[in-house]
Image: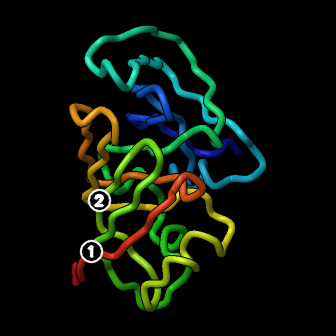
């Protein structure tokens, strides 16, 4: 019996490009796909590329573009449901608290609501566990060197391996 899959619209950000296209996800959603350690790439269908420093100028179109997961800084989606089942996002059925956070990498600043079980512990969030991509809700991504590049999304996944600074702003709940 084949697995049910669907295509979702994504905006993928790397250190030098923004890639807009569609990604095929299964029942585990985008978070399951990106945190799957049996594959090291992400296939984007109908990929359109723009350089970060010239975000309105399209530089290439491809039927398919293969991106290494380690090179991805963030992926924005148009619906929270595209991220996947809540149990995968939360890591269990514990009480989940919401925190307004700011995460900074060498290329981007991220603002959003981050859900975490228990006390906010940046060291544990950034170092412990096996998931490389963290879910931010009602998020904003802004390029550090190119302030005209700004993206807002109801949900985004941020590569924790790219984060240099992670700070709590205020309680969201």
Residue placed most toward the observer, 99 or 106? 106
Q: Say which residue label 2 marks.
A: 111
Determine whether label 2 and label 1 are within 8 Å by CB.
yes
**Of label 2 and label 1, which has the lower sequence position?**
2
Image spot of residue 10 (x, y percent):
40, 36
Image spot of residue 2 (x, y percent):
67, 42
Image spot of residue 110 (x, y percent):
34, 54
> Looking at the figure, which quarter contains the N terminus?
top right
Q: CA distance from mark 2 to mark 1?
A: 9 Å
Q: Classify mark 1: helix, strand or loop.
A: strand
> Looking at the figure, which quarter contains the C terminus?
bottom left
From this view, report whether residue 100 is shown above or below residue 85.
below
Q: Classify mark 2: helix, strand or loop.
A: strand
From this view, report whether residue 19 is shown above or below residue 155.
above
Residue at x-position 45% and y-position 64%: 165
Q: Picture quarter containing residue 97?
A: bottom left
Instruction: Classify 10 Å Cα crowding around label 2: few (below 14), some (14-19), many (20 and above).
Output: many
Instruction: Classify 10 Å Cα crowding around label 1: few (below 14), some (14-19), many (20 and above).
Output: few
Q: Say which residue label 1 marks.
A: 169
Left or right of 93 in this view: 143:
left
Residue at x-position 43% and y-position 61%: 135
Q: Picture quarter containing residue 118?
A: bottom left
Image spot of residue 168 (x, y percent):
33, 76
């Amino acid at each position: 019996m084949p697995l049910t899959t669907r295509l979702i619209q994504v905006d993928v950000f790397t250190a030098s490009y923004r890639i807009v296209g569609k990604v095929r996800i299964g029942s585990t959603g985008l978070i399951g796909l990106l945190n799957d350690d049996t594959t090291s790439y992400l296939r984007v269908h109908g990929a359109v590329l723009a350089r970060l420093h010239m975000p309105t100028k399209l530089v290439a179109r491809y039927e398919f573009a293969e991106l290494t997961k380690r090179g991805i800084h963030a992926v924005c989606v148009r619906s929270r449901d595209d991220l996947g089942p809540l149990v995968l996002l939360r890591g269990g059925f514990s009480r989940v608290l919401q925190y307004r956070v700011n995460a900074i990498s060498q290329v981007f600043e991220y603002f959003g609501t981050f859900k975490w079980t228990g006390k906010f512990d940046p060291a544990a969030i950034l170092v412990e566990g096996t998931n490389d991509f963290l879910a931010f809700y009602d998020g904003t991504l802004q390029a550090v060197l190119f302030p005209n590049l700004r993206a807002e999304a109801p949900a985004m996944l941020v590569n924790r391996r790219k984060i240099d600074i992670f700070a709590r702003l205020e309680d969201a709940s």
